[in-house]
Amino acid sequence: MRILTRYIASELFKIFLLCFISLEAIYGVIDSVEKIKDFLSHHAALPLIGQYFFYRSIEVSFRVLPMSGLLATLLTLGILSKNHELTAIRAAGISLVKATKPFLALGVLISLISIAMNYQLVPYAYQMTDYIKDVRIDQGKSGNVTFELNNVWFRHGNQDIYGARTIRDGGNELDKVVLYHLDSTFHLSWQVDAKTLRYHQGLWSFRDGHLTRFLPDGSLKIESFQKMDTTLTRRPVDFTYEKTRMTHLSYPELDRYIALLEKSHLPREKYEVTRDAMIAFPIAAFLMVLMAIPFGIREGRQVGIAKGFGISLLLSMSYWTIYSLGLALGKGGVLLPWISAWFANMIVFFVSISLFLLLNRS
């Protein structure tokens, strides 16, 4: 059994490597043809173009890994079937389920690699390719493009509501600030109006303002101040953002941003969908292999390279359609974030189990 497992694993690995390199080359050539003309029209330097395609290759590798595993599984089982090796395995009394352990191991390995890549490396690659293309090449600029939020309202704890007209100095200074403090019955207890709210040495303090207390008898008590400290725990970076997309955010960054939105009682569903999808999509590589095993065993002799590629492309596109639909439903609030992220995976899993049950009956 060990000899058989090593043999199948060896054949599977060689075919997987060939599929992976071929798919990445095809994707890369098509992508290069589209991009090179644009780069040359902007007189981009060759090292910059090379840097772009280096980071682009990381994105492409991540995208083609699931399809490579699917195609390799179909082709390997097809070859084993055409050489009557699957028949010999059955004749020797070895269960086909046990004989397919190398395929399952490949699926697990691809999923683990994809999760590791998608945790931080792939978002960074997305960020760098967009930065090189949009900033260094198309606009001829360098450095981070950072924007400051304006007209910001946010909650701090359950009793404080802050508002700021403008934000300057990279988020270190908020202008025309107001703070409403509510009591335990959610009535306005006191209010601060200040010219600025400044961050210095880890602490926030109001400058040049006045404190208005709303007394029980309905009267007001107003006190002016030049400086007054506050318990705000936000960081200056929370009031700025880089010109980016959600695909640029790593898993830890998304997690921190979701926690910040939750703390401020702001909508966070679309970010939760994106975060959960960063784990769900890599798992699809294992599920694709799982689905390909019974299909490849049943149709093995009829699966050549062309047909295997066609089937893999069809299954991959079907998965991507269902996956995109699930994400859209989650971001629209129709489904819970974790359900929308795992929607396509659940369908593929049940289809795979059904195919395995049909295979055992036959």
Image (cartoon, grey):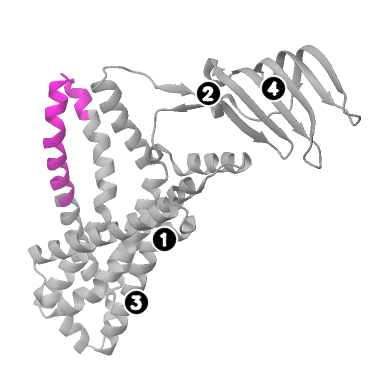
Q: Residue at x 9, y 75 (%)?
A: 302
Residue position marked by numbered label 2 in the rendering: 150
Q: Amino acid at mark 3?
A: Ile
Q: Is residue 296 above or below residue 315?
A: below
Q: Position of residue 259 (x, y in %)?
A: 58, 43
- Which residue range is magenta in the image? 23-50
Q: Nearer the viewer, mark 4 or mark 2?
A: 2
Label 3 or label 4, whichever comes before in sequence order: 4
> Which element carries disc 2, helix, strand or loop?
loop
> Which element carries disc 1, helix, strand or loop?
helix
Decide if residue 221 is in sight here.
yes
Q: Residue at x 27, y 21 (%)?
A: 136
Rendered image: mark on residue 203: 4
Which quadrant does the N terminus fall into?
bottom left
**CA separation, marks 4 and 2?**
21 Å
Q: Residue at x 36, y 46 (%)?
A: 117
Residue position marked by numbered label 1 in the rendering: 342
